[in-house]
Image (tube, rainbow, N blue to C red):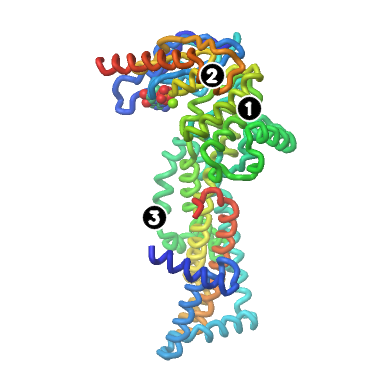
Amino acid sequence: MPDGAGRARVAGLLRLGGWAGGELVAAVPLLAGLAVWELAGWMLGFRFLPPFSRVLATAVGMIAGGELMAPLGASLLSLAAGYLPAAGLGVTLGLLMGRSRGLEFVLSPYLNAFMATPRIALVPILYIVLGLNRAVQAVVVFLGAFFVIVWSTMRGVRSADRDHVEMARAFGATKRQVMWKILLPSALPLTLAGLRLGIGQAIRAMIAAEMFIAVFGLGALLRTYGGRFDAERLLAVLLVVVAVALVCALAAARLDRHLTAWSRTPR
Amino acid sequence: MITIESARVRFASTEGGAPMVALADVSLTIARGEFLCILGPSGCGKTTLLKAMMGLVPLDSGQIRIGSHAVTGPGADRAMVFQNYALLPWADVTANIAFGLELRGASREECARQAAHWIKAVGLGGFEHHLPRQLSGGMQQRVGLARALAVEPEILLMDEPFGAVDAQTRRLLQEDLLDLMQRSGKTVVFVTHSMEEAVLLGDRVALMSPRPGRVREVIEVGLTRPRTASVEREPRFTELKEYLWERLRAMRDEAADA
Ligand SMILES: Nc1ncnc2c1ncn2[C@@H]1O[C@H](COP(=O)(O)OP(=O)(O)O)[C@@H](O)[C@H]1O
Ligand SMILES: [Mg+2]
């Protein structure tokens, strides 16, 4: 695979140069993209494509000036308030469905239907039912993350090796012990994948809900600046959204690497 | 003593046809402290018989007793070594070996102490914190054996434990098993499809034939104990091996004629 070989060579060169760590290497394609953006910004001179450095400066200015803090705080709060219950309940329900064919049979049509429904379509209904308040954001975040977490966890439990279950039973494991000591660890790689996908879904759902009503959070800011055709500020806010998403993804990747090293084939 | 009385096991066939008879009327008695080998071609129900003794596969009729207790499920008096090792890929050697103890609620210290003891006994010193995938097949099965021995069972059930390793490794594992078991007084039921292995290890050899799975004959090995691999040079060893080969070939011809 020339692609992989090329990446390995780049990594090797960076390591030779005394750079440590895979994360820097992973950042190379991203930095290249930013460089292209920067160049295009300067050379094309489009009003709607300010150079990256200007957007970054604007974002820093907005954070320093405090105008971003309240919306960012509101968004992070609803993200946490929606995502954490989605993770807890999603993993629990996924484990139960993975263990019980009956439960899977009853619930999976709903699961599939919800995964296919654009959660954004539910936003107006939720505002009507719950009123114009922040709980709606949390609920939308919850709905964005929940189903993919349930599904991945269920598939994870189903991926457990029958021989491991049989071995545990031979050594006298109770149903509970089979759950905790075999099914749960077997499900871990797919569960963590679900939790990672869920974060991305949650952030998208959150921004969509905030944009819809334009009262709370980063989404509201996006709508305001979009309405004013203020590309610099619009992109600055988006940059912050992407930064939040990247931090979440990196944290999740760390956790994943730490917990499921056993499941990766050695290279 | 293990008593197997007219054990029958059928599996529903996948196509919904007539059920597959894995064990048809198997009767067998295994004395306390005996090393019994079960020999037969693949598909004759060796694994099914072993799992029935373990209490993992229920009988359709008949009975298996350990002493005077009927087997209804797994029990602390028995432990199994699996054909494909069945090690937990996320657990290191120590944790895999201590798995049975952990299930029984042994403390962390107790698990560590027992694991350390058995790691030494099966010759895995230095690999305490390796994951299964970092070990060769032979070493993985040493872990499987240590895990079974660590729960101190009276009866050890082994399902073609050395079937998937190379010839030299297999030889070493056989010698180490002889060494470990001959003084232990444990009852061992050892499934194999190798005639040499059956004669080298067993006090008796039960010959099984397929379709439907049944025990055709039980042969007294009669080689002296303690044994080492050097028994392979005794005339009795060669004679028995020849005899078993004749019988297996006859079974195959029967099957071809049917
Ligand atoms: N869980 C099962 N479901 C259906 N058929 C099975 C099952 N386990 C074993 N069998 C069938 O029963 C027969 C005996 O299998 P097994 O005991 O594994 O034989 P052996 O260990 O001697 O190779 C085989 O024909 C096999 O296909
Ligand atoms: Mg078998």
Disc 1 or disc 2, which is closer to the eye?
Answer: 2
Ligand 1 quarter of the rendering:
top left
Find out whether the residues at labels 1 and 3 contact each other: C-beta distance under 8 Å: no
Tag on residue A116?
3
Whole-Å distance between the Cαs marked 1 and 2? Answer: 26 Å
Tag on residue A248?
none
The type of residue carrying mark 1 is Leu
In which image quadrant can residue B256 be found? top left
Q: Which residue is mark 1?
A: B149
The type of residue carrying mark 2 is Val
Q: Earlier in the sequence, mark 1 or mark 2?
A: 1
For ligand 1, tell me if the residue under mark 3 lies within 8 Å: no
B147 or A194: nearer the eye? B147
Q: Which residue is mark 2?
A: B231
Q: Name the element at disc 2.
A: helix
Spot the residue most to the left: B257
Q: Name the element at disc 3.
A: helix
The type of residue carrying mark 3 is Ala
Q: Name the element at disc 1.
A: helix
Report whether mark 1 lies on the same chain as mark 3.
no
In the image, taking residue B201 as reference, residue A36 lies left or right, namely: left
**Relative vertical location of residue B7 with respect to residue A128 in this rendering, above or below:** above
**Which chain does the residue under circle 1 lie in?**
B
In the image, taking residue B6 as reference, residue A78 lies left or right, namely: right
